[in-house]
Image (cartoon, rainbow, N blue to C red):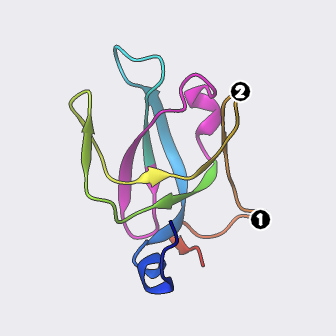
Amino acid sequence: MLMTFDEFQKANLRVVTIIAAERVPKSEKLLRLTMDAGNYSKQIIAGIGTAYEPEYLVGKQIPVIANLQPRYFLGIISQGMILCASTDAAPVILNPEQEVPGGTTVR
């Protein structure tokens, strides 16, 4: 299904810096990521726990969709979605080639 350019522009894509990461209790797959998005912080629950250790992710910059409606996973609110490449083996996080300020717009 194709989307229009106007539909694409509704997605608020930002680069954020992960400032804290921890496993979600009772889940092997879910991680709770706290992110610096420039002038605010954001919490996202991501299903990348089988591919990444939380301590590896701290300090990494990644792109996120920042304007999704909040959603709950195991009773914990998620305020967006990280963007990953998907392989048969595992998700692969994406990151900018060089460091940018938290909250930088992805175009």
Q: Is 6 situated left or right of 88 in this image?
A: left
Q: Nearer the viewer, residue 33 or 70?
A: 70
Q: Which residue is mark 1?
A: 98
Q: Which residue is mark 2?
A: 89
Farthest top residue in view: 26
Residue 42, quarter of picture: bottom left
- Which percent across, then down, holds residue 30? 43, 28
- Which percent across, then down, holds residue 51? 63, 26
Which of disc 1 and disc 2 is earlier in sequence? Answer: 2
Which residue is painted at 59% across and 70% down in the image?
101
Q: Are there few (<14), some (14-19), or many (20+) residues within 10 Å of tag 1?
A: few
Spatial separation of the CA atoms under disc 2 and disc 1: 26 Å
Q: Is 46 situated left or right of 88 in this image?
A: left
Farthest left residue in view: 75
Q: Is 99 situated left or right of 107 in this image?
A: right
Q: Amino acid at mark 1?
A: Gln
Q: Is 25 situated left or right of 99 in this image?
A: left
Q: Which residues are magenta?
A: 35-59
